[in-house]
Image (cartoon, helix red, strand yellow):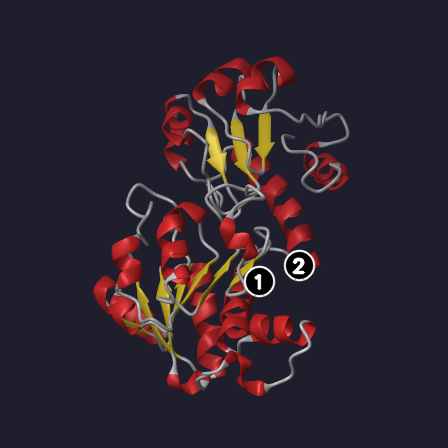
């Protein structure tokens, strides 16, 4: 178990492994970086990680059969090297769809309704409805989704229920599937032109890195809101900050940043028009339990050679 401090202990994982593999299983908690895995871990059949990277060198040093990521994304895991070695890489893709969708819409609503401004005004002794004006009705606003996977779909469902018009850009999802959810499929340029709220749910890939750059932000309306519950590096933070300072955006709700935890001097942390949460969109007591259970169950299934949901590289089963 890498990142043992993430949940505070590994007792739940130990119980799940013993249930699945028997009481003879040994579960070690090791707090180390990828570069330290070889010395700190030694031999291991399965490596479980929340955000510690796992390189080809670490796979070779441990002789592991499975690398299990306690998350939806697999940033920092060398999947190509794993496949070449017959190492199965797993993730937990669907455990927190509702929570992330709710978090994205909550960030958007807080900024649409001017809640940070009203809160700061009240704390400063001001008490007037006009402090956050203008506030437009949700029914007049378009909620634009960048990516329409499980979490984007969840956010779209909730935005629709609240009365937003909802559109989505995702070149990997058929327009018919988007339309079936009551959402309008649009191109990338149309997404930027129409979105009053741009809600980012894209994974980090070579294609999406810095996708929301200065040009993309300039294409948004001056009263638009940017919400990111996807990956921090999808957004150019310098361009975002420039737009906020120039009153070219209404605000931003950020659950992910380029560097986590952020530098305390990051100017985004001190702005009234920015809400920052600590990569917490996934969390509820239900999802925490579910993540720990599914993370171990998926890892064990892959270890046994099953093509389970969450197996990133099924071709490794044939190696």
Give the mark nearest the N terminus, 2 or 1: 1
Which residue is located at x 44 percent, y 84 percent?
Answer: 136
Which residue is located at x 49 percent, y 20 percent?
Answer: 59
Q: CA distance from mark 2 to mark 1?
A: 7 Å
Front-lying residue, 28 or 284: 284
For the N terminus, the image quarter is top right
Q: Which residue is mark 2?
A: 284
Contact, mark 2 vs mark 1 (Cβ under 8 Å): yes
Left or right relative to 14: residue 59: left
Which residue is located at x 46 percent, y 33 percent?
Answer: 76
Residue 9 appears at what percent x and percent y?
Answer: 75, 37
Residue 66 visible? The answer is yes
Residue 202 appears at what percent x and percent y?
Answer: 38, 54
Front-lying residue, 57 or 193: 193
**Around disc 1, counting alpha carbons within 10 Å, would you say few (fewer than 14), some (14 to 19), or many (20 or more)?**
many
Residue 236 visible? The answer is no
Q: Which residue is mark 1?
A: 99
Task: Describe the element under mark 2 as helix, strand or loop.
Answer: loop
Left or right relative to 234: residue 60: right
Task: Describe the element under mark 1 as helix, strand or loop.
Answer: helix
Q: Is 80 situated above or below 203? A: above
């Amino acid at each position: 178990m890498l990142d043992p401090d993430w949940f505070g202990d590994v007792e739940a994982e130990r119980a799940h492994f013993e249930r699945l593999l028997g009481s003879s299983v040994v579960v070690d908690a090791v707090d180390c970086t990828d570069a330290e895995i070889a010395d700190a871990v030694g031999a291991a059949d399965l490596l479980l990680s929340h955000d510690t990277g796992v390189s080809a060198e670490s796979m070779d040093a441990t002789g592991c059969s499975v690398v299990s990521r306690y998350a939806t994304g697999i940033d920092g895991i060398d999947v190509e090297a794993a496949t070449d070695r017959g190492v199965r890489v797993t993730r937990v893709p669907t455990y927190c769809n509702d929570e992330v969708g709710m978090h994205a819409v909550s960030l958007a609503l807080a900024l649409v309704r001017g809640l940070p401004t009203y809160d700061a005004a009240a704390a400063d002794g001001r008490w007037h409805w006009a402090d956050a004006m203008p506030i437009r009705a949700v029914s007049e606003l378009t909620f634009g989704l960048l990516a329409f996977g499980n979490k984007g779909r969840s956010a779209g469902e909730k935005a629709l229920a609240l009365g937003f018009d909802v559109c989505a850009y995702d070149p990997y999802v058929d327009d018919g599937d988007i339309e079936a959810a009551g959402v309008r499929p649009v191109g990338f340029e149309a997404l930027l032109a129409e979105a009053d709220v741009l809600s980012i749910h894209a994974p980090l890939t070579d294609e999406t890195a810095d996708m929301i750059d200065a040009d993309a932000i300039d294409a948004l309306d001056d009263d638009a809101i940017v919400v990111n519950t996807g990956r921090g590096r999808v957004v150019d933070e310098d361009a975002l900050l420039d737009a906020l300072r120039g009153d070219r955006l209404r605000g931003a709700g950020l659950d992910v940043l380029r560097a986590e935890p952020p530098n305390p001097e990051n100017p985004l942390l001190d702005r009234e028009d920015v809400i920052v949460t600590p990569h917490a969109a996934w969390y509820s007591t239900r999802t925490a339990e579910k993540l720990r259970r599914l993370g171990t169950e998926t890892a064990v299934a892959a270890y046994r050679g099953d093509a389970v949901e969450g197996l990133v590289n099924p071709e490794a089963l044939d190696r």
